[in-house]
Image (cartoon, rainbow, N blue to C red):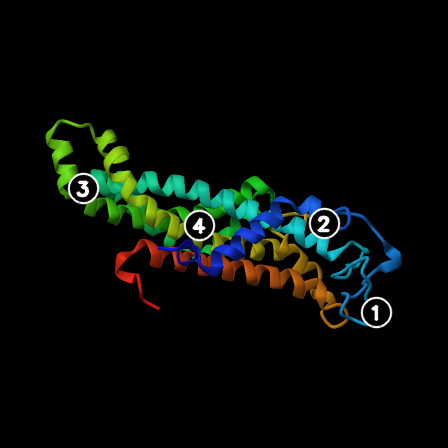
Amino acid sequence: MTLWRAIGPGGVIVAAIVLVALLAPAFAPHSLNAFDLTHRLSPPIWDARGNWTHPLGTDTLGRDVLSRILHGARTSLGIAGAAVLLAAALGIVLGLVSGYAGSWADALIMRLAEIQLSFPYLLLAIAVMALFKPSLVNLVVVLVLRSWVVYARLIRVVTMSARERDFVVAARALGARAARILFRHIAPNVVGPSIVVSSFQLAELIIVESSLSFLGLGVQPPTPSWGGMVSEGRDYVGSAWWLSALPGLAIVVTVLGANLFGDALRRSLDPRLRGVG
């Protein structure tokens, strides 16, 4: 299996965007909130009125759009990435317990998951963020609530299948404790599916975070986020389209890359899909 087949073009896109986000202060041509009112609403360089001082133009306060997109990548990827890690940790543990213990533990965890899934998530997220003061911590919590169910349901199925396999039955016969069986014998089997799900969840949570920021319930100014930048430019779509279009394009490329990466991982980790497509 080649590295290219394992990560695909999506992996390259995601890796490049993560690298750019990590090195945003070095790549950004201007300070994050540096005002330049003399170049207010300056267009990108491919426009006849554009200039190389601000390659992707400026916003209504004369701030450099490229610099804010680069720093916005840190915000959007950081929040979505943290939420994916926390949701994966919570969902995997609950899925392992639910799938292995069965009985009342399984019923309790699955009923809780079903209750959460019965509510339209975006409306629930809006209600929670409106009820509590919007903050990065509250935003991450809301995103974790969105994703843990996906992991728990998947890991439960994997665990229920693995607990009847010979190596688990043998460990149980030798007197191994449930915790040892779960985390030493069964947990390695859920790593592959969890990684694949995480790549798709990263894409989905970037969209959710951007949606909440667009509505003013996510990342608050002056911290830049792609969704917030799209919202700030919506009143200038006719005269300064780049304010919304360029951060929106960043969202599209990142989400597309994450989904392509997840699909490549799924194909490389699932023997039944190798050689397909």
Which of the two labelled residues, at mark 4 and mark 2, occupies the earlier sequence position?
A: 2
How many angstroms separate mark 3 from mark 1 (CA)?
Answer: 66 Å
Which of the two labelled residues, at mark 4 and mark 1, occupies the earlier sequence position?
A: 1
Give me the residue at 64% from left, 51% from top. 72
**Element on which disc 1 rests:** loop
Q: Position of residue 120 (x, y in %)?
A: 44, 58
Indicate which disc residue 163 carries: 3
Q: Nearer the viewer, residue 228 or 184?
A: 184
What is the crowding at mark 1: few (fewer than 14 residues within 10 Å), some, or many (at least 20)?
A: few
How many angstroms separate mark 1 from mark 2 (CA)?
Answer: 21 Å
How many angstroms separate mark 3 from mark 2 (CA)?
Answer: 51 Å
The residue that label 4 is drawn on is 146
How many angstroms separate mark 4 from mark 3 (CA)?
Answer: 27 Å
Q: Quadrant of the N terminus?
A: bottom left
* Amino acid type shown at disc 4: Arg
In front of the other: label 3 or label 1?
A: 1
In front of the other: label 4 or label 1?
A: 1
Q: In the picture provided, is 25 more to the left or to the right than 186?
A: right
How many angstroms separate mark 4 from mark 1 (CA)?
Answer: 44 Å
Among the 4 quarters of the image, the one containing residue 248: bottom right
Q: In the picture provided, is 24 more to the left or to the right than 50?
A: left
Give me the residue at 15% from left, 32% from top. 171
* Amino acid type shown at disc 3: Arg
In front of the other: label 3 or label 2?
A: 2
The residue that label 2 is drawn on is 28
